[in-house]
Amino acid sequence: MEKILVLDFGGQYNQLIARRVREQHVYAEIVPYNRITPDEIRDAGYVGVILTGGPNSVYDPASPHYSAALLELGIPVLGICYGCQLIAWMAGGEICSADSASEYGESRLTAGPGALFHGIPEESVCWMSHTDYIRTVPPGFRVLAHTPNCPCAAMGDDRRRVYGVQFHPEVTHTACGRQLLHNFLYDLCGCRGDWTMDSFAAGAIERYRRELSGKRVLCALSGGVDSTVAAVLLHRAIGEALTCVFVDTGLLRKGEADAVEQVFRGMLGIDLIRVDAADRFLGALRGVSDPEQKRKIIGAEFIRVFEHEARKLGHMHVLVQGTIYPDVIESGLGDAATIKSHHNVGGLPDVIDFDELVEPLRELFKDEVRAVGEELGIPRALVWRQPFPGPGLAVRVMGEITAEKLAIVREADAIFRAELEAAGLDREAGQYFAVLTDTRAVGVMGDARTYGRTVALRAVTTDDFMTADWTRLPWELLAKVSGRITGEVAGVGRVVYDITSKPPATVEWE
Ligand code: XMP
């Protein structure tokens, strides 16, 4: 399979770049710049390399640099933003910093002829975000495009097939971004486009059928899209040799555990063992209010419950988990700070009582997991469901978790979701839920003073969950939800709506 390397210099768009490449049916993987050498790049058989942006200045000795040997491998290279400046620096160009030349936002791009800009209009709009700029292009390079403020918005050396763009082709504001990446992948790297989800699913089924033959396999079901797709994929491969265990942690939404059971047994025809472990999880979480600790405890409990079930079933050789690519990256691959440890990866205990861990979706982005799900015939309504964090309602109850608090957030959440869906707004908001804050507030009911809990509602619009905007829900809807929650959920005195975007906030409160 042909593959592109996204060499990561710490830019916020590194995952987006890889996704944009994969959207064009070419497999891309992200590797931090300090984890791979030019020799390893050559030996791994990459057909092209993309250098990401990053927050640094190339002339700062502490900023990430890379060996100029990369440019001599004979593999096409495309640098984006910082990556472009880095190429200029490596190849002997001159980079300057000038606030007067800095650009942020949309800019007018004027492009000349050349392979990288093939089929792109001479004038278009691009997205810029930089202070440094290239004053002199390195020997062997020529300027391919400019903006009013940036004399070298793109440069290239056709002989070595090394290119750089100061703007961001991966963001949708850049009108020619898609075409430019297409030109790089297909015309310059010679890709054929063999990365499709039907070939992924067929290949994975075939491989697991071979590799797991004769083995007994246990699948950890959380009820979410990822583990559902992983389970169905494995079921296709090995059928009855797969045993699915679904743990009801007591941290799922209202009615969710029953729904999961019905879908598996009914629609998908996959048998499952349902374990009611709510008391066990509540016990393990007693007295814990730190979010990261909650995640670790839940991850650890999850595995222990599976181990326990596995022992009852006799020795199981393999454990399947629905870990996906962003879980792997966000759990601290490279230099990027760990923001939240996702429990599938970060919280995995060191000792696992299985011979092998299989994570069939480890290389896939969420939209790819969904495409595989559709490919496997999983109902659309299930595949396109809004995401729900692995640690469940534990990260939606602030502070210590109790059965009473869980009951409150579950009811409030069910009301909010039902009203939002009834209003037909569930497509606009990618994720919407209720949070139980640990703030109490004074209120009045009848003639009596109350001192109830505060529920926060959160709805976000996003297409990748890396960034998100709060959804502008209609006032009438919010009024109705607020009235219903304070009227129907005992113990709640106030309802507030979260109007913070990501960044600076995250989607979840913990
Ligand atoms: P944040 O809060 O990081 O959320 O902006 C981004 C997306 O990830 C989900 N999320 C999690 N999913 N385990 C998961 O499986 C977790 O620990 C976790 N934390 C957040 C969140 O719901 C959103 O879709």
Image (cartoon, rainbow, N blue to C red):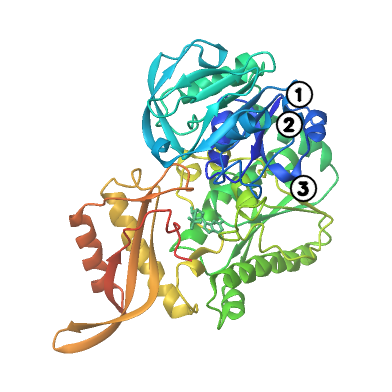
Q: Secondary structure at mark 2?
A: helix
Q: Find disc 1 in the rendering and name its residue.
A: 72
| Disc 1 residue crowd, few under 14, some 14–19, many 20+, Cα 10 Å | few
Q: Is residue 31 left or right of residue 223?
A: right
Name which residue type carries label 2: Ala
Closer to the eye: label 2 or 3:
2
Identify the residue at image location x=37%, y=54%.
Answer: 501
Q: Are marks 2 and 1 in contact (CB under 8 Å)?
A: yes
Res 323 seen here: no
Q: Secondary structure at mark 1?
A: helix
Q: Quadrant of residue 155?
A: top right
**Labelled disc at residue 241:** 3
Q: Is mark 2 within 8 Å of ligand 1?
A: no
Nearest the viewer among 8 and 258 is 8
Nearest the viewer among 381 and 345 is 345
Name which residue type carries label 3: Ala
Nearest the viewer among 141 and 78 is 141
Q: Quadrant of residue 206?
A: top right
Res 508 seen here: yes
Name which residue type carries label 1: Glu
Q: Label 2, label 3: how many angstroms apart (C-alpha)?
A: 51 Å
Q: Quadrant of residue 498?
A: bottom left
User: Residue 123 location, x and y as percent?
Assistant: 37, 17
User: Residue 411 location, x and y as percent?
Assistant: 36, 68
Q: Find disc 2 in the rendering and name its residue.
A: 68
User: Residue 234 location, x and y as percent?
Assistant: 70, 43
Pick whichever of labels 3 and 1 is earlier in the sequence. 1
